[in-house]
Amino acid sequence: MRLDKLLCDLGEGTRKEVTLRIRRGAVTVDGVTVTRPETKVDPETAVLTFDGLPVVYSKYVYIMMNKAAGEICAIRDPKLPTVVSRLPEKLRRRGLFPAGRLDRDAEGLLLLTNDGDAAHMLLSPARHVEKTYFVRYDGTLAPDAEARFRNGIAIPADDGDPACVCMPAELIRAGEQEARVKVTEGRYHQVKRMIAAVGGHVTYLRRETFGPLTLDADLRPGAYRELLREEITQIEEIKRKTRRQT
């Protein structure tokens, strides 16, 4: 791979910025200063520094964010703050996007990545990836709410999404007017519609798990971190299993 393209792909700057820095001697490859942007390097084995700092190659980036209420799950928006706008420019240059969505007023676990295969695997309805949500609600849930969730609850139409019968889910009462909901699909406003169907009105919603990932308790709303090696390994294993099945 060309050196300038590699550094651009890693978010170190625009092609023009990176080219200029290379020509000024800011880059070393395997301990040798390289001044030609077109120099070919093996991204998997080359030892790089940029402005004296090590550059570690990774094809994909995975960010766990505790989404804050009031932000939308989008790359950019002309009026509203987005989850991607929280990231520093270096990460935004990597082409990250939110894998799935949470409602604007919701909080909780969100994966941002540039790995399209992983996003598709986690979001595909055919994969039935489990997600857990903590909710607070007004009202009183029906006595048979748990059974109705297990049997597949009917929910009404909402803002263009048709009425339907949900796949079997789990409702766990967690306290006075609090509960956890586990679902394996991702319909529009699904958890809110399910709670409404059994007599409640969701006032707070936070996603706690998404497939193999569990929200880091140390992440305040709006904070984020890169996935740990073991978390990435879990995603890679699911991708391998998916490929074997197709």
Image (spheres, rainbow, N blue to C red):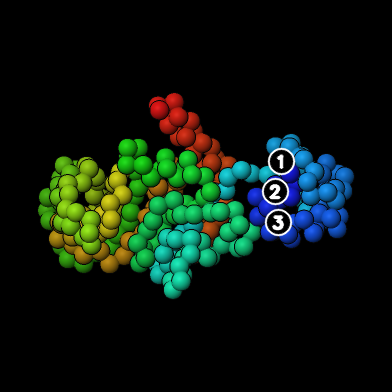
Name the amino acid, label 2.
Lys
Residue 119's disc number: none
Given residues 59 and 190, the one toward you in this image is: 59
N-terminal-most mark, 3 or 1:
1
Quarter where residue 193 is shown: bottom left
Q: Residue at x 86, y 58 (%)?
A: 24
Q: Position of residue 143 (x, y in %)?
A: 12, 53
Q: Residue at x 44, y 61 (%)?
A: 74
Name the amino acid, label 1.
Met
Left or right: where 199 falls relative to 52: left
Q: Residue at x 53, y 65 (%)?
A: 86
Residue, disc 3: 15
Report how far apart the C-alphas of labels 2 and 1 lie in the structure.
7 Å
Q: Position of residue 97 (x, y in %)?
A: 49, 54
Name the amino acid, label 3.
Arg
Q: Quadrant of the N terminus?
A: top right
Mark 3–mark 2 CB contact (< 8 Å): yes
Given residues 19 and 25, the one toward you in this image is: 19
SS of the residue under disc 2 = helix
Q: Quadrant of the C terminus?
A: top left
Q: Position of residue 184 (x, y in %)?
A: 30, 43
Dot 1: within a 10 Å radius of its alpha carbon, few (fewer than 14), some, or many (20 or more) residues?
few
N-terminal-most mark, 3 or 2:
2
Report how far apart the C-alphas of labels 3 and 1 lie in the structure.
14 Å
Residue 1's disc number: 1
SS of the residue under disc 1 = loop
Residue 207 appears in view:
yes
